[in-house]
Image (cartoon, rainbow, N blue to C red):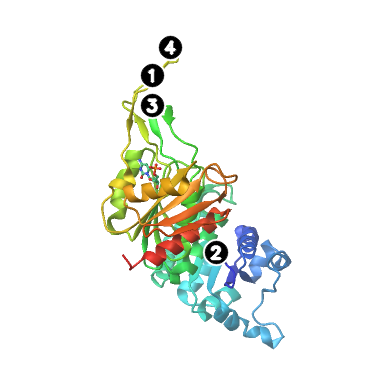
C-alpha cells in the first residue's frame, strides 16, 4: 500500500527513539522505501544498525563525513522524499525548526525538502506544555507542518502527563493521510458508518449483533488514504480509532440516525456499512430487570431505516447481508432504498462477513451492473467499493 513511496524518517534524541524501530518496521512491511536519518543524540538511544536491519537500507547519522558524497545527502534525500516524518521530535528540534536552524541531519532535510512534513513530538509534559514549545509548534503548524500530538501517560521521569510519543498506528495513519492528499478522493467528503448498533433493554443489557466494525473501518481508512475527508460514525467496536478520520461514536440506531443526518449535510457520499439493529425494545427499564420470573417478554418496535430515510444529494452505498438469492434480494434493497450501489455479502460463505478480516461480496450498481469479487481482505473490498464511488462522482 505504501509501495513506491519514499519516507524519510528522522529520529532525534529522546527515550522514545526506540519506538522509531516499530514505525520503520511497519512502514517497510507496507512496502515503503524508508530512509532513516538520525541525530547523534538519537544514536545514544537506539543503534543505527537496528534501523538499517529493519529497513534494509543505509542510515545517515552524520552531516559532514570525509566521504564527500554524504555532505549533499540531505539535498538528495529531501528531493526523493514523498513525506518527511520526524518521530520522536524533541523540544530542541522543534525550537531549531521554528528558528530556521539546521545543524543536524533531520533538520537539514526538513529545510531541503518540498515534501509534506510530519512531526511527532515526545518530551516531558512540562516541556511540552511550556509556552515556548507551544508557540514553536503553532508557528510550524501555520507553515503547514502536520503535528501528531503526543499522548497522555507515564513519562520516563516517572511522572504522568502529556508528552509520550503517539502510538505507531497513529503516526503511520497520519503518514497515509498526508500521502493521500493527491488521491482520487482528494477534497471529497465521505460519511461512513460501522459496527452494530445497540438497543438498551435495561441499564446493563441490550439487543445487538456481532458486527465487528472491520468493514466500515477499512472503508474509512481506505477513503482517508485516497485523500477524502472522512467522518466515521461508529457503533461500539473494539477497534482502535483510525488516525486522520473524524470518529463520531454512537450506540443506538436513533443516535446513529441523528449523527448521519447531521454529517451528510455537505457530503459527497454516504457508505452505510453499519449493521443496524432492526428492532428496539418499546420501553427501556430504568432499573436492572431482576431474573425472578421464568419467562420474560420483551415488546419490540422497528427502528428507523437510516439509509432509506436520509435526505440529500450524495452517492448512497448500502450493504446487504444475505444468506440466499443474494443478487435478487440485494437488487430489491437497492431499489427500495434508492441506492447508487449495494454491496451484497454472502454470510454463508467461509471467511466472509461478521468478525473476520476477509469478505466475499458482489457489487451491484443502480444501472444493473453486477460485479462478483473473489474472497479478499476487507481493505481490498473497501478499495473496490471506493473505485465504484469515484466512478460515479460527477456522473449523477
Ligand atoms: O434492510 P437491510 O438491513 O438488509 O439493509 C442493509 C443496509 O441498510 C445497510 O447498508 C444498513 O447499514 C442499512 N440500514 C439502515 N437502517 C436500518 C437497517 C439497515 O440504514 N434500520
Mark 2 residue crowding within 10 angstroms, few (<14) / some (14–19) / many (20+):
many
Residue 297, numbered circle = 1
Task: Tell me which numbered mark, 3 or 1, is placed earlier along the sequence.
Answer: 3
> Where residue 88 sits: x, y (%)?
57, 62
Considering the numbered disc 2 on the image, is that residue within a helix, a strand or a loop? loop
- What residue did someone put label 2 on? 90
- What residue did someone put label 3 on? 201
Distance Cα–Cα, label 2 vs label 1: 61 Å
Considering the numbered disc 1 on the image, is that residue within a helix, a strand or a loop? loop
Considering the numbered disc 4 on the image, is that residue within a helix, a strand or a loop? loop
Badge nearest the viewer, 4 or 1: 1
Q: Mark 3–mark 1 contact, CB under 8 Å?
A: no
- What residue did someone put label 4 on? 293
Residue 300 against residue 99 in the figure, above or below = above
Residue 385, numbered circle = none
Is 50 displayed left or right of 11 in the figure?
A: right
Residue 300 against residue 303 in the figure, above or below = above
Mark 3 residue crowding within 10 angstroms, few (<14) / some (14–19) / many (20+):
many
Residue 108 against residue 200 in the figure, above or below = below
Residue displayed at 33% across by 50% down: 335
Is 66 displayed left or right of 157 in the figure?
A: right
Q: Is mark 1 within 8 Å of ligand 1?
A: no
Is 168 displayed left or right of 141 in the figure?
A: right
Task: Tell me which numbered mark, 4 or 2, is placed earlier along the sequence.
Answer: 2
Residue 38 visible to an observer of this rendering: no
Considering the numbered disc 3 on the image, is that residue within a helix, a strand or a loop? strand
Amino acid at each position: 500500500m505504501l509501495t513506491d513511496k519514499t519516507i524519510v524518517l528522522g529520529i532525534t534524541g529522546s527515550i522514545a527513539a526506540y519506538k522509531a524501530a516499530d514505525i520503520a518496521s511497519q512502514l517497510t512491511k507496507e512496502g515503503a522505501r524508508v530512509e532513516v536519518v538520525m541525530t547523534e543524540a538519537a544514536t545514544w538511544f537506539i543503534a543505527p544498525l537496528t534501523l538499517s536491519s529493519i529497513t534494509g537500507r543505509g542510515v545517515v547519522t552524520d552531516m559532514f563525513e570525509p566521504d564527500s558524497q554524504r555532505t549533499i545527502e540531505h539535498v538528495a534525500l529531501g528531493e526523493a522524499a514523498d513525506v518527511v516524518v520526524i518521530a520522536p521530535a524533541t523540544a530542541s528540534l522543534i525550537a531549531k525548526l521554528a528558528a530556521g536552524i539546521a545543524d543536524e541531519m533531520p533538520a537539514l532535510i526538513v529545510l531541503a525538502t518540498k515534501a509534506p512534513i510530519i512531526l511527532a513530538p515526545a518530551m516531558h509534559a512540562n516541556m511540552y506544555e511550556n509556552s515556548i514549545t507551544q508557540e514553536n509548534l503553532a508557528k510550524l503548524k501555520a507553515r503547514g507542518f502536520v503535528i501528531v500530538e503526543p499522548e497522555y501517560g507515564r513519562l520516563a521521569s516517572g511522572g504522568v502527563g502529556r508528552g509520550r510519543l503517539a502510538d505507531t498506528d497513529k503516526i503511520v495513519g497520519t503518514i497515509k493521510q498526508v500521502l493521500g492528499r493527491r488521491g482520487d478522493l482528494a477534497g471529497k467528503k465521505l460519511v461512513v458508518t460501522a459496527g452494530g448498533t445497540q438497543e438498551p433493554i435495561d441499564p446493563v443489557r441490550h439487543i445487538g449483533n456481532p458486527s465487528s466494525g472491520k468493514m466500515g473501518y477499512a472503508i474509512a481508512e481506505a477513503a482517508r488514504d485516497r485523500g477524502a475527508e472522512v467522518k466515521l460514525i461508529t457503533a461500539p467496536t473494539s477497534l482502535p480509532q483510525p488516525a486522520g478520520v473524524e470518529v463520531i461514536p454512537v450506540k443506538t440506531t436513533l443516535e446513529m440516525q441523528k449523527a448521519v443526518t447531521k454529517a451528510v449535510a455537505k457530503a459527497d457520499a454516504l457508505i452505510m456499512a453499519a449493521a443496524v439493529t432492526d428492532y428496539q425494545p418499546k420501553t427501556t427499564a430504568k432499573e436492572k430487570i431482576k431474573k425472578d420470573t421464568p419467562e420474560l417478554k420483551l415488546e419490540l418496535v422497528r427502528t428507523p431505516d437510516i439509509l432509506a430515510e436520509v435526505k440529500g444529494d450524495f452517492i448512497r452505498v448500502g450493504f446487504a447481508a444475505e444468506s440466499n438469492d443474494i443478487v435478487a434480494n440485494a437488487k430489491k434493497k437497492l431499489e427500495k432504498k434508492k441506492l447508487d450501489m449495494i454491496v451484497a455479502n454472502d454470510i454463508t460463505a467461509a471467511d466472509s462477513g461478521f468478525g473476520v478480516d476477509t469478505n466475499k461480496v458482489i457489487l451491484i450498481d443502480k444501472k444493473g451492473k453486477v460485479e462478483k469479487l473473489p474472497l479478499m481482505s476487507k481493505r481490498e473490498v473497501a478499495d473496490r467499493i471506493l473505485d465504484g464511488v469515484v466512478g460515479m462522482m460527477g456522473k449523477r
